[in-house]
Image (cartoon, rainbow, N blue to C red):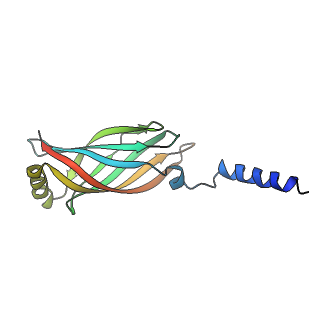
Amino acid sequence: MKKILPRLLLALVLVCGFSACHSPESITAGLKLELTQIERAGDGSVRVTWRVQNPNVFSYLLSQTTHKLFLNGTLVGTITETNPLGVPAQSHAETISVLTPVKPPAGTVLDQAVALGTANYRLDSMLFVLLLDEQIEKIPRVTSGTVTVSTK
């Protein structure tokens, strides 16, 4: 009996480890978002370059993402990316999205950021991650840092 109990416990741990005992957030732990550049065009449109860092040994498919972008503490706009984005294992993926500005503070805050060349940002994001068998999980992420802001 003493020899069977440790084996049963080990089997239980292994089964739990490879089944639904993990939450989607623990499966995607370590995924990090960061802004790499904000570029304002002459026509007033704004393009945001952002990156997903994946330190995990699993690849991910982001079927959709939504973001609220704050610059220097002010909400300047939202980003909705409906194009799927594959994130390779232990690598990163980068994409460029169009910012939908919030009126009126967006223009003023962006003008100030362009004049300075950088801005502090906070990105409140929702990642829609395709896991298995077309199961999509919503994973919230909040990230912050400093980003380069320029005009084209």
Vertical order, 84 against 119 (above or below):
above
Q: Tell me the quarter of the picture where residue 41 sits.
A: top left
**Observer-nearest of 110 and 101:** 110
Residue 97 at x, y percent in the picture = 27, 43
Residue 6 at x, y percent in the picture = 81, 54
**Observer-nearest of 62 and 133:** 62
Q: Residue furthest bottom?
A: 73
The image quadrant where one finds the N terminus is bottom right
For image coordinates 46% across by 40% down, the residue present is: 61
Residue 31 at x, y percent in the picture = 43, 48
**Horizontally, is 110 left or right of 52 in the view?**
left
For image coordinates 24% across by 52% down, the residue present is: 146
For image coordinates 46% across by 50% down, the residue present is: 30
The image quadrant where one finds the C terminus is top left
For image coordinates 15% across by 57% down, the residue present is: 106
Vertical order, 85 against 29 (above or below):
above
